[in-house]
Amino acid sequence: MDYTIKQERLTADKYIEFLKKSDLGSQYPKERFNERIQTLVNNVSISLVARNNCNEIIGVCFGITDFAYWLFITDLGVTRECVGQGIGKALIKKAHELAGGEKNIAMYTCANDGAIRFYEKIGMTHSTDVMEYNHIEWTGFTVK
């Protein structure tokens, strides 16, 4: 499949439409969903979008970075019909390059159980040095 990856800031509505076509939409809490998605798309450091030849969004990668030491992948998703075609891997590689490259930048993510195998396959390992402080209300749901 031919596709292009570009830096592009999506609107909240476009991102929500994409979430409906991928499995990524199940990672968000229901609480203040639309408001928080708006904040996400407005403020994320790296915003990459993969589009097919028909200009349809088939993949998204968001990351926060200091462009000096670390990159945290907050969102990585591919539409269900395009999974397994290398799009996620290409998005991660491009995000890492934009942040400063693998020789300078440590990359982290919080992977859901279904994505662990993908991240291991692209060379990521389980971290032993990440701490968490999480006291937010979290009602799971799937974006539909």
Image: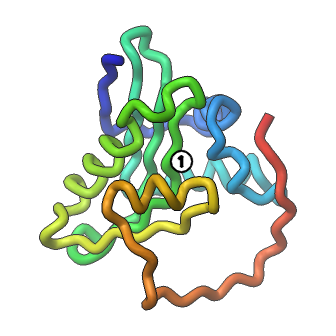
The location of residue 54, given as percent across then percent down, is 43, 9
Quarter of the image for the N terminus: give it.
top left
The location of residue 114, given as percent across then percent down, is 62, 54
Which residue is rendered at x = 65% and y = 50% of the image? 37
Which residue is rendered at x = 23% and y = 53% of the image? 98
The location of residue 88, given as percent across then percent down, is 41, 42
Up the image or down, 104 lies above or below 142; here it is below
**Dot 1 lies on which element?**
helix
Up the image or down, 71 lies above or below 40; here it is below
Residue 103, quarter of the rendered image: bottom left
Q: Residues within 10 Å of mark 1 (few under 14, many from 20)?
A: many
Left or right of residue 32: residue 81: left
Up the image or down, 33 lies above or below 79; here it is below
The location of residue 38, given as percent across then percent down, is 63, 48
Quarter of the image for the C terminus: give it.
top right
Q: Residue furthest right?
A: 139
Residue type marked 1: Val
Which residue is rendered at x = 60% and y = 86% of the image? 132
| Residue highlighted by disc 1 | 41
Which residue is rendered at x = 79% and y = 45% of the image? 142
Q: Residue furthest left?
A: 103
Q: Residue furthest top?
A: 54
Residue 29, quarter of the rendered image: bottom right
